Amino acid sequence: MSKRDFLDLIDIPAADLRAILDDALATKRARADKPKGAVDEGAPLADHMLAMIFEKASTRTRFSFEVGMHQLGGSAIVARAGEMQLGRGETVEDTALVLSRYVDAIMIRANDHADVEALAAAASVPVINGLTDRSHPCQILADLMTLEEHGFDLANSHLAWVGDGNNVCTSFIQAATKFGFKLTIGTPARYAPDEEDVEAAQDLQARVHLYDTAEEAVAGADVVIADTFVSMGDADADERLDLLEDYAVTTDLMELAKPTARFLHCLPAHRGEEVDAEVIDGPQSLVFDEAENRVHAQKAILKWCLNKL
Ligand code: CP
Ligand code: NVA
């Protein structure tokens, strides 16, 4: 069997993604009353080591992967790329070959998606994309897990993304091809998601629709999703804040979704910018379940990568 990298949802069979979500939901339930450091029944990744490389800041990804590895019975080593020889010009390929001798899997958060692909191509162990300029697949599995946990049937749900058609949005577009939900996206033309990704998803019969306004995208939605207007690495902050102002998830915008609609945001959030405090801190918001589920979803991703699922 070829090694299992977790780089983009589009490359992973829908049945495998389903198995990851099922395992995440079941394992979360099974350890509900245990302390956070307790190792799961059977220590599925006992004796396994994960290396984590960060070229960008992180709170959730960094902590959730390390806690997750511990709960699976394994261990993790974390390094900022700037502290590694990678930051002094050692190649991605040599880094991959060396780390493959030390650890059983590598998680990387990188500026350039191509570097993650190069790392995966050179490594003999599985590589997990912990966010790049292009995508954030781990996040979306935690998000979908959160929705299922709150009673949503994904194939019959309407998710609305508003704001910047960014890396997180791209992973939602890819997920729509695997889980069958309807995805409406409201962005200014300048910050629309990559046309190729949208067309590729539509070619796979995904129900992905683009709109110019937040109002059109959110109308009748079951779930409204926002993310920061300025992602890590974006150089045009002023222009973004200006153009994206009308795409904020306000209490008025939420009124256009179903009365039962829930709100997701991968965090970190900027209250008063992309979302009103009343929405993100209100009863429709699922953001802290969503953040917690990063641990549970990633444990299942790690098990899948290491052929334990
Ligand atoms: N949502 C997310 O990936 O958060 P961090 O940047 O804190 O890891
Ligand atoms: N789109 C954001 C997500 C942060 C988790 C970024 O890339 O900065």
Image (cartoon, rainbow, N blue to C red):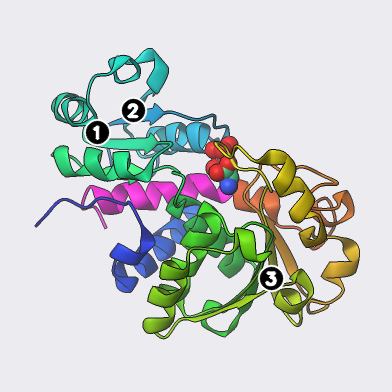
Q: Which residue is nearer to you in this view: 300 or 258?
A: 258
Q: Quadrant of the C terminus?
A: bottom left
To which quarter of the image does residue 108 belong?
Answer: top left
Above/below status of 305 relative to 54 = below
Query: Which-is-in-front pick, marks 1 and 3?
Result: 3
Q: Tell me which numbered mark, 1 or 3, is placed earlier along the sequence.
A: 1
Is disc 1 surrounded by few (<14), some (14 to 19) or many (20+) residues within 10 Å?
Answer: some
Left or right: residue 216 compared with residue 38? right
| Disc sitting over residue 223 in the figure | 3
For the N terminus, the quadrant is bottom left
Mark 1–mark 3 distance (CA, rounded to whole Å):
37 Å
Circle number at residue 187: none
**Which residue shows up at 16% across the image and 50% down it?**
3
Q: Earlier in the sequence, mark 2 or mark 3?
A: 2
Q: Quadrant of ligand 1?
A: top right
Q: Residue furthest left?
A: 1
Q: Amino acid at mark 3?
A: Val
Q: Are marks 2 and 1 in contact (CB under 8 Å)?
A: yes
- Residue at 77% x, 61% y is 247
Residue 118, image x, y percentages: 23, 41
Residue type beneath disc 1 = His
Residue 75: which numbered mark, if any?
2
Q: Helix, strand, or loop for circle 3? A: strand
**3D distance between C-alphas at marks 2 and 3:** 36 Å
Q: How many marks?
A: 3
Q: Are there few (<14), some (14-19), or many (20+) residues within 10 Å of tag 3?
A: many
Instruction: Give residue 20's position: percent from left, percent from top.
Output: 37, 61
The residue carrying pointer 2 sits among few (fewer than 14), some (14 to 19) or many (20 or more) residues within 10 Å by Cα, namely many
